[in-house]
Image (spheres, rainbow, N blue to C red):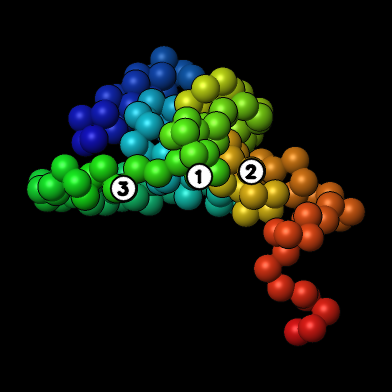
Amino acid sequence: MRDFLTQIKNIADELVGVGSAVSLEEYVDAVLEGLPQEYAPVVSVIESKFVTPPIAEVEALLLAHESRANRFRKQSFSPSINYTQGYSRGSISGESFRDRGGGHSGRRGGRCSGRGRGGRFANFQCQICFKYGHTTNVCFYRADVNYQLAKSLVLYDPTTL
């Protein structure tokens, strides 16, 4: 990860050297776009912030995630435990339809990097509409004041609070 971050910094420095300044948003986007799928949870956290975090914070989050992932990889699990970890929500046959991807999964400019099967946010479930494939910050229903969950999805009655 440190090598990757150093490469991005070197490219940004070269661009500045030839007179093409790189904004913080462009810098962070370049870092996030170059990450593999295993960093999707961290990318989601960073992209959900209203203000682009400083690059030092982004780097700290990525390095901490890498460290946790490395510790997790070093642990040994028996095959039976690994087998029970994978489940398929709502499908008896074992085929999962929840990683359909699709939608508009970018920010600042509307990149469509999440389109198609296995997109960047395929395993994320929206907390607004409870559909898979996107996060709340890009949910179609986010600003719709008339949107109501299906009765079966309402967890509590807000009028009784």
Secondary structure state at the residue bearing disc 1 = loop
Secondary structure state at the residue bearing disc 2 = loop
Where, quadrant-wise, is the N terminus in this rendering?
top left
Q: Is residue 22 visible?
A: no
Q: Residue at x 79, y 83 (%)?
A: 160
**Residue of label 2:** 131
On the image, the x and y values in percent for residue 51 come to: 57, 50
Q: Residue at x 56, y 28 (%)?
A: 100
**Residue of label 3:** 85
On the image, the x and y values in percent for residue 109 come to: 65, 28
Front residue of 19/11: it is: 11
Q: Residue at x 45, y 41 (%)?
A: 88
Secondary structure state at the residue bearing disc 3 = helix
Disc 1 versus disc 2: nearer the observer: 1
Q: Earlier in the sequence, mark 1 or mark 2?
A: 1
The image quarter in which residue 127 lies:
bottom right
Front residue of 23/153: it is: 153
Q: Disc 1 versus disc 2: distance between alpha carbons?
A: 12 Å
Q: Amino acid at mark 3?
A: Gln
Identify the mark at residue 55; answer none if there is no mark.
none
Where, quadrant-wise, is the C terminus in this rendering?
bottom right
Task: Please state if 27 lies on the left or on the right of 125 as rendered.
Answer: left
Q: Amino acid at mark 1?
A: Arg
Label 1: few (<14), some or many (≥20) within 10 Å? few
Front residue of 80/135: it is: 80
